[in-house]
Amino acid sequence: MIPVTKPHLPNIDVYKSYIDRIYQSNQLTNNGPLVKELELKLKQRWGVKNVILVANGTLALQVIYKALGLSKKVATTPFSFIATASSLSWESIEPKFIDIKPDDLTLDPKRLENIPAKDIEAIIPVHVYGNPCDVQTIQEIAESKGWKVIYDAAHAFDCEYKGKSILEYGDASTISFHATKLFHTVEGGAIVTNDEALATKVRSLINFGYTDGIIDLIGTNAKMSEVHAAMGLAMLTEIDSVIDRRKRLIETYIHHLPSELTTPLIENYNGSYFPVLFPDEKLLIKAVKKLESKNIYARRYFYPSLDQLPIFRSLEYCQISSKIASRVLCLPLYSELSDNDVKYILELLV
Ligand SMILES: *Cc1c(COP(=O)(O)O)cnc(C)c1O
């Protein structure tokens, strides 16, 4: 059986050595030593000022909305995982869907130009599949309109833009460390920001609103535990080879890709996904069935476009996103996959 992805499990002895430290410290959660160590290591890896670890990527989004005081209406992309938009609705913020660019499938900033400044409070673009958004144009428009920008960087572990970590841009970025993501802590995520005051506020919000023992904000509980941080620290010792392996598999996929198919991945992919575009939905469904008959499970990711969901259908229709969603398929990608598996999968596609 070949699934679309398999979580990477790091060397068990390395993992145990971190668990041993939890048994010694007897601290299981509440900003413990392993959470602090993982934050420091990620900060150094990306060259950013603040990494605040949280319980998952969805809470990372919810907390940053609160920290930035968003409450009314926010523009986002419909070509994403449901959590990008549902986290807004969950906080009683109305999502406004903005269509995507047909080449890299990220939010099309040209479509923001005609939105009156007071209609929305912020933009939540997504670096989908690790493709960097058109950050420069987004920042210019947001600045001229006075909008906040939060990048949903759930897929963008280790991505760079103009020579630095993509997590440097905007007011903040959020990332997910769910088991199915490139780098994981079983469940987990982070908020990244270079704004010190915002970071202080976020640290308070994820811990019931406590700052230095005093409650001065309405907070929630979004802390990462020491057990989750232990998995992250063990993962970190192997992540470079995991990424190398996945990038090599993507190269094999691209090298042997049938001429009918294209990939929306742009050049500097981070190894997080391998999406392909079929000429139409019929051919995609045919390929999915053929793969399933051989016990291979690709995934229609992302499908449907979020503007097509009944829960959001009253909102604007995004034609490009809807069409792309109907013909995009993510092919299996994980470090144990072999080059021969990849070639076999490709033979079944057309
Ligand atoms: C996975 C994902 C999330 C949610 O992260 P969780 O850690 O699973 O809560 C949010 N946005 C995008 C784009 C994702 O892929």
Image (cartoon, grey):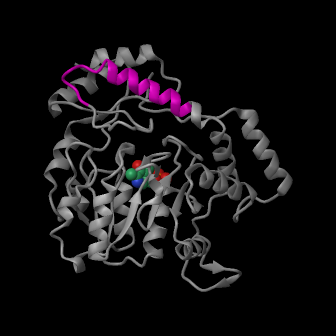
Residue 251 is covered by the magenta coloring: yes
Specify the quadrant that holds the C terminus. Answer: top left
Residue 156 in the magenta stretch? The answer is: no
Relative to 120, say whether 328 is above or below.
Answer: above
Q: What stretch is highlighted in magenta?
A: 242-262
| As drawn, 38 above or below 95 | above
Is residue 15 visible to the viewer in this orientation of the structure? yes
Q: Position of residue 29 (x, y in %)?
A: 71, 61
How many labels sit on residues?
A: 0
Residue at the extreme right of the image, as rendered:
24
Is residue 94 visible in the rendered image? The answer is: no
Q: Residue at x 46, y 69 (%)?
A: 64
Q: Quadrant of the N terminus?
A: top left
What residue is rendered at 53% in x and 49% in y?
Answer: 177
> Which residue is located at x 26 percent, y 75 percent?
145
Percent x, y for residue 15?
72, 39
Q: In this view, does 78 lie to the left or right of 218?
A: left
Q: In which quarter of the image is residue 325?
A: top left
Q: Where is residue 144 in the image (x, y as percent from the top left)?
A: 27, 74
Judge whether 20 appears above or below 112 on screen. above
Magenta stretch secondary structure, dominant? helix
User: Which residue is drawn at the image coordinates 66% and 44% (left, top)?
Assistant: 231
Corner quadrant of residue 171: bottom left
Residue lying furthest front: 163
Of 201 and 112, nearer the camera is 112
Query: Is residue 176 rendered to the left or right of residue 303?
Result: right
Q: Where is residue 57 in the image (x, y as percent from the top left)?
A: 48, 56
